[in-house]
Amino acid sequence: MKIIILDALTYGDTSLVGFEALGDVAVYQTTSADETMERVREAEVIVTNKVVINDAVMEVARSLKLICVAATGTNNIDHDAAALRGITVKNVAGYSTDAVVQHTFSMLFYLMGHSRYYDEYVKNGSWQKEAVFAHIGPSFSELRGKTWGIIGLGEIGRNVARIATAFGANVWYHSTSGKNENSEYEKTTLSRLIENSDVISIHAPLNPSTENLISHSELLQMKDGAVLLNLGRGGIVDEDALSVIIDVKPIFVGLDVLTKEPMKTPHPLLAVKHPERLYITPHIAWTSREARERLIVATIENIKTFVIA
């Protein structure tokens, strides 16, 4: 079996040796759109994370039987074209839930506890000049008793809710599809959630109903001092609007995802006057070592079960 792995760099240092037992494997660290067709020409199995596999790519890959998306989202695949050609598409779900939940709280506590300020205060020598043992700078609050609003109560959202509740927060949620029902937590409107939550975390997919879901009016509705976290998809938070509002309203925002990744310069979020209110990580919430290992194991299993079937 000819297996082509198109963007191995997205898995970091995770071992791909398990693929070798399944056939003849070609590994490319990255693959541009111009390179895709030539590389998959002889492929029976394509493994991709973000490389787009459209109808034109499938047309040249005459032996292609299986597309394995080493991720949960499959919007980089032309599903209609695959179905017409009898090509199976498989993805991997649930492999990064623990990692994303953990990063959600990591971002929250970094912002809520003003960690950047206090770390720099010590390292720049300011603490050493204090007259007392504790420096009381920007005040921070406890999570207990706060209201946590979750946008998108899927598997990740439910696990965030469970841990937030353990910290003593009061959790409610908004379903972007309108279909999600959960008796454990109160369901509410987006406007009410935004206006009254101390913490808002986004764990929803990007689609026409969630694109720019959080824009100028929503950001202005947030409580002063509230924290907004986007660990769903870039494009749900309007970055242009955020770059303006964060300088005129005291809110704190953590983003692990952006509309364009990697981030391009110039970018409006790199020019804000209050960078201490903004924490951006480079789409790493899903990338714990364990999550990447689970992803590769599950992708290999997808190939094995396809061959057996």
Image (cartoon, rainbow, N blue to C red):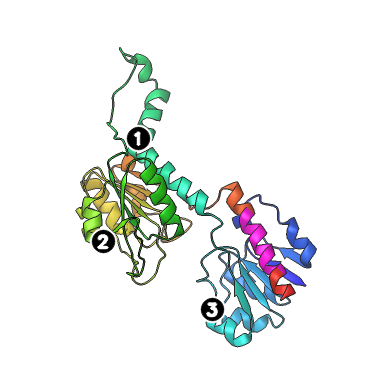
Query: Is residue 116 positioned above or below 28 on the image?
Result: above
Looking at this view, name the residue that lies furthest to the top: 131
Q: Are the residues flagged by discs 3 and 1 in contact, CB closer than 8 Å?
A: no
In this image, 57 relative to 282: left or right?
right
**Residue that label 1 marks:** 113
Cα–Cα gap, marks 1 and 2: 26 Å
Q: Position of residue 276 (x, y in %)?
A: 33, 39
State which region is magenta: 294-304
Tag 1 secondary structure: loop
Q: Mark 3 against mark 1, which lies toward the viewer?
A: 1
Q: Secondary structure at mark 2?
A: helix
Q: Badge 3: few (under 14), some or many (20 or more) residues near its Cα, within 10 Å? A: some
Three-letter amino acid code at the position of disc 2: Leu
Q: In the figure, residue 135 lies in which quadrant?
A: top left
Mark 3 to mark 2 CA distance (whole Å): 32 Å
**Three-letter amino acid code at disc 3?**
Asp
Which numbered tag is attached to residue 190?
2
At horizontal 61% and vertical 78% (from top left) the residue drawn is: 57
The location of residue 36, given as percent across then percent down, is 63, 72
